[in-house]
Structures are given as C-alpha cells and as structure tokens.
Image: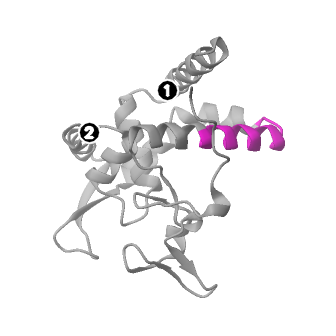
Amino acid sequence: MSRESELGAEIIVHLARLAQSCGETRLTAAQWSALRFFARANRLSRTPSAFSAFHATTRGTASQTVKSLVALGLLERHRNEDDGRSIRFELTAEGRAMLAGDPLRGLVQVLDDLEPAERQSLLSALRAVTGALAGRLGVPVFGTCGDCSHCSDDGAASFCRCAAVALEGMDMGALCVEYDPRPDTQPPRLAATR
C-alpha cells in the first residue's frame, strides 16, 4: 500500500466529514444521505432496499433511517403503482425545503469553482475508484437511466428492459438501483491490486 494511496483515502474521508459539517445540521449524515437519495432516485428505486444498497448498509438500518424521515414529515409512503405490493417513498414539501440547507451545497460550490477540465478529471477518477471498490465489495454501482445499458431510447420514448416499464423524462437523469453502465459511459478500469 503506497503512502499516496493512504493519504488519498484519508483526504476523501476528511472531505466527506467537512462537507457534512456545513449548512443545516438537524439531520444525521445517514438521514441527509437518504433524503438526497429519495430526491434523486427514479420512481422504481425509491424503496428502503434500494436506499440500503446505495448507502451500503443493512436493510434494517436503512428502514430505521427512512422511518425517522417519515416521522419528521420529510418523506411520505405511497403504494408503488408499478407493483401494488411494494411501497415507495416521496419527499414532502418540507423534505424538498429541507434540501435547500443541504450540507453538501458547500462542496458543490467548491467543485463548481474548479476549472471544467479539473472537475471532469476529478469526476472520472472518483467514478473509477467508486466502481472498483463497489466491485470488490460486491455491491451495486449507482448511475442514471440515461447512462444505463438497460435503457432503450429511440428519441421519442424510453424503456427500461430490466424493469419492463416505460421511463419518464425525469427518470433519465435519476439514480437507479438496477443501473448497469453502458460500455461508453464506464470509467477506465483501475489497475488490479498486487
């Protein structure tokens, strides 16, 4: 293990902690992650099990986090219209308003201040690292429907072959639990570890 890699890992963890300490602090880091997830996920992925996979935690822990946001009036339960047996969660007006104080806004502003080429290079490196670590752990990598190999888009309509449902325009830029990156959207592979 190189010292640069150790330092890089420490910097990433430190950056995450710094980003979480800015802005509104009434929610825990896990609650913020859940609120962001349910705001960005497509309608098929707004479930506790999808959040569990995204947050890399147990279903029980994810369910408790979701229940706490429901109790705070930030999320509400709905019957899933695509599968009447399951429940999906939606942000309430209060939940959307809470996102205005999202602690990650400070980090987003700092990233916006980077030169476009620097920002793109950083994003590419972070995607590669995230994909490699998720692969090692055997957990899914999340991405958007628009970049997914399951999505067929003929210009007029989009369809998810995995879930066998038509996709709405807002789904195309949303996170999906069934995401499988198209070959042209995958970051370069990281070298295998020694």
- Residue 147 in the image: above or below residue 122: below
Q: Say which residue appears at 47% left-offset and 55% top-offset.
A: 40
> How is the structure coloured here?
one colour
User: Do labels 1 and 2 touch, CB within 8 Å?
Assistant: no
- Magenta stretch mostly in which secondary structure? helix
Q: Give the range drawn in magenta.
A: 113-128
**35 part of magenta stretch:** no
* Residue 133 percent location from the top left of the image: 49, 36
Q: Judging from the image, what secondary structure is the residue with disc 2 in?
A: helix
Give the labeled residue for mark 2: 65
Q: Check the picture and name the quadrant holding the C terminus.
A: top right
Q: Residue furthest front?
A: 194
> Which quarter of the rendering shows the N terminus?
top right
Q: Position of residue 69 (x, y in %)?
A: 28, 43
Question: Which amino acid type is marked by label 2?
Answer: Thr
Residue beneath disc 1: 20
Residue 80: image location, x then y, percent: 25, 70
Report whether 95 appears left or right of 9. left
Name the residue rendered at 68%, 47% in the picture: 188
Q: Which residue lies furthest to the top in this view?
A: 3
Q: Which of 182 and 192 is in front in this view?
A: 192
From the viewer's perspective, tell me whether residue 26 is left or right of residue 48: right
Rendered position, 107 above or below 7: below
Q: Residue at 44% across / 51% down in the picture?
A: 96
**CA separation in Å, label 1 and label 2:** 17 Å
Q: The disc labelled 1 sits on which kind of residue?
A: Gln
